[in-house]
Amino acid sequence: MLLNFLAHEGGKYFNLGDKFGVQASTYHSIVGELIDIISTHLLKKFVVWPTLRRMEEMAQHIEELHGFPGVIGCVDGTHIPIQKPLDDLSPNCYYNNRHKNFSILLQVTAMEDYSFSHVESGAPGSVHDARLFRKSSLWFEDGDRIDTLFPHEKFHILGDAAYMIKRYLMPPFKKYGHLTAGHECYNKAHSGARSLVEQAIGRLKGRWKVLLKINVNDPEKAEKIALTCIALHNLCIVGNDVCEDEVRDEQESEEEMLRQGRRVDRVYGIDQLGVRKRYNIMRHISNRN
């Protein structure tokens, strides 16, 4: 019952209840209980940060494929459309102007096998990717110890141009019209490596099509459904159940990305350690080409 519900876009309890020959209330109770269990307990088992050995293997694999060193994950946000919340005092906070619908925002970090090593949820669709990152457990202030997640300074995750630069988060060089050949070389390798998170999200939504539109008006319930899909997505990968059916998110325009990037730099500042690290990575990539 649960898998059938998650596999259909906008699946409604009463429709799928008829399919299984049970009352909608019974179907609702069974599916709801399973979603609570998986999103609360199994998620912690199947969505885990990589071990040091796994990081080394991942970084080597990604560098061999795309030429970008030190990558142990790629982060991005994805919107999950929902119905207009009924009991929210300010429902417009769930309205996202770019997508023109009500949504919740998930932040996911993907690995090279298209599984997820980290997920952050609970944000309304109006929240910017960088703001959710700032509130997530992946955020470290300058001077904080980061070795619990990044045990060596050579490791980092990749984000798109809407993210801030940190010593452990590498965005591309923003295209303000003055990129050198070295910048372009870096950006090409960065784009190739970072595409894995777009593919991972695409496969997640390709398998669990309920994420294309969750027909509930309770954001917390929608969040649990989304987290259940992520846990089961990772479980399928562990079991070698490959799904190559991808539903790609609509991508922001380059102009919008640059606008957001400028705002992020202005609000959060520029991490000079991250700037120096990115420059060294650029030189490394350029020298290999």
Image (tube, helix red, strand yellow):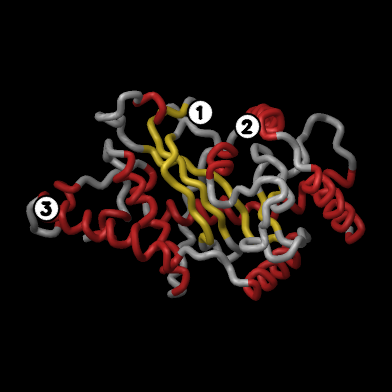
User: Residue, x 46% and y 73% (percent of image)?
Assistant: 238
Q: CA distance from mark 1 to mark 3?
A: 36 Å
Report helix, strand or loop for mark 1.
loop
- Please give the residue where the numbered disc 1 appears in the rendered image: 98
Identify residue type, mark 3: Asp
> Left or right: 43 with respect to 10?
right
| Quadrant assignment, res 42 | bottom left
Among the two numbered marks 1 and 3 on one chain, the one whose residue lies closer to the N terminus: 3
Nearer to us in this view, 261 or 190: 261
Residue at disc 3, secondary structure = helix
Q: Which residue is mark 2?
A: 253
Q: Count the marks: how many?
A: 3
Please rate how many residues cluster around mark 2, counting C-alpha atoms within 10 Å: few if below 14, some from 14 to 19, many from 20.
Answer: few
Identify which residue is drawn at 65% across, 40% down.
Answer: 163
Distance from Cα at disc 1 to Cα at disc 2: 10 Å
Earlier along the polypeptide chain: callout 2 or callout 3? 3
Q: CA distance from mark 2 to mark 3?
A: 43 Å
- SS at mark 2 in the image: loop
| Residue at the (32%, 46%) spot, across then down | 9
Q: Is residue 262 above or below residue 15?
A: above
Q: Would you say 187 lies left or right of 119 here?
A: right
User: What residue appears at the point 45 percent right and 34 percent down from the top-left corner?
Assistant: 125
Identify the disc placed on residue 18.
Answer: 3
**Which amino acid type is marked by label 2?**
Ser
Q: Position of residue 10 (x, y in %)?
A: 29, 44
Residue 19 position by quadrant: bottom left
For the C terminus, which image quadrant?
bottom right
Q: Position of residue 266 (x, y in %)?
A: 70, 28
